[in-house]
Amino acid sequence: MIEGPLPLAAGSAAAFNDEAERYEAWYDTPRGGMLLDIEIRCVRPLMEKLARPRLEVGLGTGRFGEALGVRYGLDPSWEALGRAQARGIEVVLGVGEHLPFRTCSFGAVLVAFTLCFVQDPRLVLREIRRVLVPGGGHVLGFLPRGTSWADLYARRGAEGHPIYRTARFYAKEDVDALLSKSGLQIIERRSTLFQPPGLAVYEPEEALEGHHEGAGFLAVRATKPAA
């Protein structure tokens, strides 16, 4: 493990350290595994269009990164990174607001679910733009505010859930504005997770091109200008 800057969101990092084992075990359940598959199916076509090397900011235990060909990952949770490293990903302890990488280092940067946990999303996106090569791409997956999935986790946070109590969910329009102000141009979107939370069994879903109302998960591909 390569150690980067100490995490700024120490409270969140501590919560993820404590919850890493339970988080990992949930994805091994039939429900968790199916939801993971649905989200990866949505993101994969966007990532496949982008060059390597690839970085994931907010790597967690590496489930997304491993499935999407990510070689490098950054996270403030050392417990989660240990599990990601066992999946063959080169890991760095740090936060998205201060990426410990050289300018123009990556062909692609992935952020899946992490935006709602960062302290300064504008700074994170500016840092992502900095480390992308000209013409490189950023893929952002998130739960849009106002949907049943984001509302569920917002309620859990209000009730004191150790992870979601610090989460801030963003509407599609908020994310569009954040990307634009960071100098990243939106190229395409994909929508999935139309099944509501709380089901005993989830069925496979194919993602839809574009933004669709009612989708619990949206993925966006944006690029850094080539010039």
Image (cartoon, grey):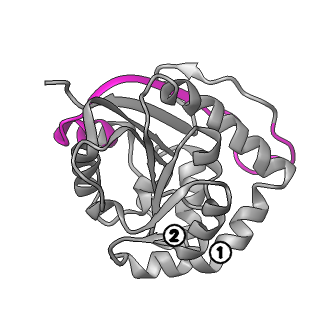
Above/below status of 218 relative to 101: above
Q: How far apart are marks 2 and 1 (CA)?
A: 20 Å
In magenta, the rendered stretch is 175-202
Could you tell me which residue is drawn at 58 percent across and 30 percent down? Answer: 44
Could you tell me which residue is drawn at 37 percent across and 63 percent down? Answer: 118
Q: Where is residue 26 in the image (x, y as percent from the top left)?
A: 77, 60
Nearer-the-camera pick, 108 or 124 = 108
Q: In this view, does 124 lie to the left or right of 7?
A: left
Q: Tell me if residue 83 can be seen.
A: yes
Q: Where is residue 1 in the image (x, y as percent from the top left)?
A: 51, 69
Q: What element carries label 1?
A: helix
Q: Where is residue 215 in the image (x, y as percent from the top left)?
A: 57, 33
Q: Looking at numbered disc 1 in the image, what kind of residue is underneath it? A: Glu
Numbered label tally: 2
Residue 8 - label: none
State the residue position of label 1. Answer: 19
State the residue position of label 2. Answer: 1
Assess whether residue 197 is covered by the magenta stretch: yes
Q: Looking at numbered disc 2 in the image, what kind of residue is underneath it? A: Met
